[in-house]
Amino acid sequence: MKKSLIATALFLFVSLPALAAPQTVTLSVPGMTCSACPITVKAALNRVEGVTSVDVRYEERDATVTFDDEKTTVEALTQATTNAGYPSTLKQSQAKQE
């Protein structure tokens, strides 16, 4: 019985990282006023540890970011854009498995 519990616990501990799925969020970035602004926003988001992809759309004034939620948070993403001079807020959120 003890061996079974230990084996189960070990399996859960080892497989836990495999259960984490990438998260995708869309940030509203209303301060982008020219076609060069997305370059700065994208660079700021790409510098955040755990970010795997960034798509910034000037026309919609938003940024869609896929990231590892074990390495970063939405708050860290919005802080990164704010630090770059482009305050952002969460527009929509959805879990996305790659």
Image (cartoon, helix red, strand yellow):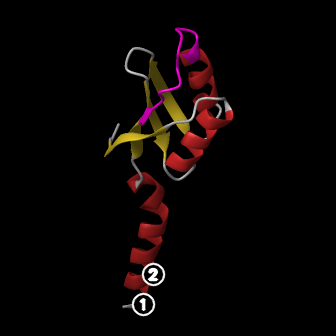
Per the model, the C-alpha gap separating discs 2 and 1 is 6 Å
Residue type, mark 1 in image: Lys
Against 85, is 13 above or below?
Answer: below
Labelled disc at residue 2:
1
Residue 69: image location, x then y, percent? 49, 50
Query: Residue, x 40% and y 44% (percent of image)?
Result: 23
Q: Is residue 84 left or right of residue 72?
A: right
Against 43, is 75 above or below?
Answer: below
Magenta stretch: dominant secondary structure:
loop
What residue is shown with label 2? 6
Query: Residue, x 62% and y 23% (percent of image)?
Result: 43
Task: Inspect the magenta stretch and tell me whether residue 28 lies in it.
Answer: yes
Residue 29: image location, x then y, percent? 48, 29
Check disc 2: other Cα within 10 Å, few if <14, some if 14-19, many if 20+.
Answer: few
Residue 72: image location, x then y, percent? 56, 48
Q: Which residues are magenta?
A: 27-37
Q: Is residue 95 left or right of residue 17?
A: left
Against 29, is 71 above or below?
Answer: below
